[in-house]
Amino acid sequence: MDFDVIVRNGTVVTASDIWECCDIGIKDGTITAVGPRLIAAAGVQEIDAEGAYVTPGGVDTHVHLSQLDGLIPDLPNYVADTYDTGTRSAVAGGTTTVITFASQMKKDESLVPVIEEYHKLAKGQSYCDYAFHVIVTNPTEHIVEHDFPKMVEEYGITSVKLYMTYKPMKLRDYQILDVMYSARKLGITTMVHAENADIIDWMTEHLEKKLMTNPHHHGTSRPPIVESEATNRVISLAELMDTPILLVHVSSGHATKHIRDAQTRLLPIYGETCPQYLFLLADSMRKGDFEGAKCVCSPPLRENKVDQDAIWAGIKNGTFTTFSSDHAPTKWAHPNGKQRGLQHGNLPYGKFRYIPNGLPGVETRLPLLFSGGVLSGRITPQKFVEVTATNPAKLYGLKKKGAIGPGFDADLTIWYPQEMFEPFKLTNEMLHHAIDYTPFEGIEFKNWPRYTIIRGKVVFSHGQVVGQMGYGQFIRRGKSLLPGPRDVWLSEWRP
Ligand code: URP
Ligand code: ZN
Ligand code: ZN
Ligand code: ZN
């Protein structure tokens, strides 16, 4: 056979198998052969993977880049990574495809200009392949009846994200049903940020009256029931509408149990969790006077190791379909010299309500789970591949991504042979994002990608980004490859 590139002698991992001393043959950016001792003609590029794991390139399906969403009032454009810096960071951590968000503002009457706007932001700027989800904040009849079909057919966008909280974005249950009704017909996967908005607002007001406004009180305002109530509610809406949903960034044991129970009843309910809920706890929000603001995200880091253990269990037992970064990067130092959220504070430590929510993590996602999950013996290499690449690709209809086999894009992450790797403690200077901190500072890594390969081309090698901005292509997606509606109904009503 005729190859352009052969990856030699790796320990090749898929979501189901491990093949030792295995070669991968690549032609025109596609994997064309997997097996031992592939024969190379003269001039074929050979990449040595002897003694190293070779996994499918990471597919990170929850990444916020260049997002214009006004999440925090008076802090427009708070997402500080652009397609350039965010995807540079992605490839430096072994990720080869990201799905980012094109976000509707409530005033936007059509999704078309929104999608076009994000295409402009991304075009020619991305180091890795990318696709879009659309965040729907105002599901008018025009949007769900007219723009949704266009989004699927013309733009190849087959998923939406809905928020149950955040004033500029949140939907009422009635509106969620409007979205689900149309999503079901069109085969759209609906992602949901499930937190009870009224509890959060009430608690925030009442904590401020007691001057409990430090960063860690962000967590005080959002105990696990805030997530579990909304999770249970939106699962009920999805059951009524018989439509698949994915609960994003699940943080607590309570919410995990709701998802697990729904899955046991065979509902098409999917779950996503993120590195911060496996590797950090709420004490990170208590550091220094306002240093804890670096670790404010929603849902919040949990107080209790019981929640963290439940999230690990949910990865192992299959409750979590995907493991994404929820890379939502904002800088610690703001241009006016004040720290994250402090500029709004009239109290000694500012107010947690003004801290932009979200953490940077697109680069650390794979190495954290590889090091802290696979190499520490908590999960198998196959489980790692399943939740970081294969399932994300299948759930969101990325047909040629997320697996190692003939016909798939040659997107690969090659790790270091263990004996060649000196464990190190992470500092932010090692990362390639545009953010001035990492919440994972000081965590020890037992491995890191040695090569990242996208469609047969090495884009990251031995600590250096060697790919080009603009190499990344927009990927039109098909419908989800995971189970969808079942045609099981709760009443005589049919759509
Ligand atoms: O705190 C978070 N997760 N911020 C990012 C936006 C979102 O809700 O995913
Ligand atoms: Zn329109
Ligand atoms: Zn969210
Ligand atoms: Zn997010």
Image: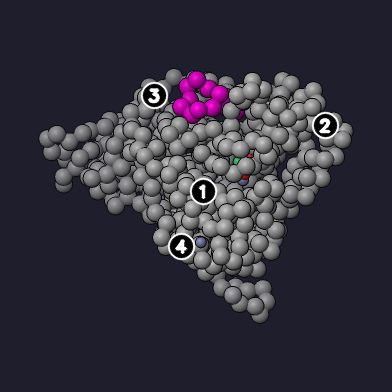
Q: Which residue is mark 1?
A: 102
State how far apart marks 1 and 4 are (Cα): 15 Å
Specify the label residue 150 is tagged with: 4
Within 10 Å of disc 4 (Cα), the crowding (few <14, some 14-19, many 20+) is some
Specify start and end residues of the magenta stretch as a single range: 428-440
Q: Amino acid at mark 4?
A: Lys
Whole-percent x and y of residue 22?
Answer: 29, 40
Q: Please name the residue that numbered disc 3 is placed on.
A: 463
Residue at mark 4 to residue at mark 3: CA–CA distance: 41 Å
Disc 1 marks a residue whose amino acid type is Ala
Q: Position of residue 286 (x, y in %)?
A: 73, 26
Query: Is 269 included in the stretch rendered in magenta?
Result: no
| Distance between mark 2 and mark 3 Cα atoms | 43 Å
Front label number (4 vs 2): 4
Mark 4, secondary structure of its residue? helix
Near mark 1 (Cα within 10 A), the count class, few <14, some 14-19 or many ≥20, is: many
Q: Is residue 208 left or right of residue 43?
A: right
Q: Which mark is residue 90?
A: none
Which numbered dot is residue 212?
Answer: 2
Number of marks in the rendered image = 4
